Amino acid sequence: MLSRITRLLVGLALYGVGCALTVAAGLGVDPWTVFAQGLSRVTGVGIGWITNTVGLAVLLLWIPLHQRPGVGTVANILLVGTSMQVALWVLPHPDQLWMQALLLVAGVVLVATASGLYIGARFGPGPRDGLMTGLHGRFGWPIWACRLVVEGSVLVLGWLLGGTVGLGTVVFALGIGPLVHIAMPLLAFPRPTSRPPRLANA
């Protein structure tokens, strides 16, 4: 249990740092971060704190979808945005394209690695992933359609609010799936194997 909790907490913290790297790169970020960035520009509140707030708001949408949060869901809301905000206080925001590209690639790889850690700990989905599965369970839509509708909506809204959409958004969209596919089996906590039943003494 201690190992699983450690994987969860480390994974969520690294996820926030990975998102911060993509923000610092300035080349475009993933749809949910575009949305948080747009809200941050409008409100003046730090993007990390906005990320936590959005996570909590999304969790409230679980109620009509009859989704139940796990420990990992709550930890996701508390840790991802916080670690993102702390990382953004210390990360550089370079103007050179090669440094921006380096930060972007490092961020995407780190997010994928962190996903393998926290998802593999099996403490429940994050609020955004739970929204996708909740919509799937409630309306029967395919997961890809749920993700397309939700992430497409927050992407457009975030862009209208001033969030950064660009090459990094495309790189994230194309790279995160294959990288998580590689990270998951490498970093997932092994499931306990059932012991064979003992034979009774003759």
Image: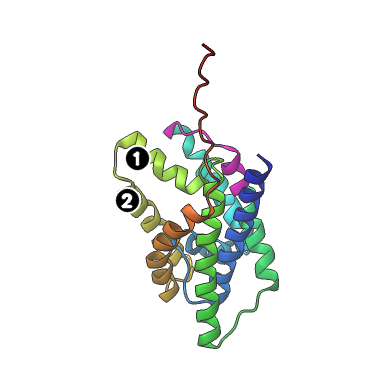
Marking on residue 136? 1
Q: Quick check: 6 above or below 137?
A: below
Q: CA distance from mark 2 to mark 1?
A: 9 Å
Q: Quadrant of the N terminus?
A: top right
Residue 39 figure quarter: bottom right
In the shown orientation, is residue 168 left or right of residue 10?
left
Q: Quick check: 148 above or below 19?
A: above
For the view shown, which residue lies furthest in the front direction?
Answer: 202
Marking on residue 124? none
Q: Earlier in the sequence, mark 2 or mark 1?
A: 1
Residue at the location (62% across, 57% down)? 81
Residue at the location (56% across, 58% down)? 114
**Residue closer to the observer: 104 or 31:** 104
User: Magenta span has 158?
Assistant: no
Residue 173 figure quarter: bottom left
Residue 125 point in image, percent of width and height: 50, 43
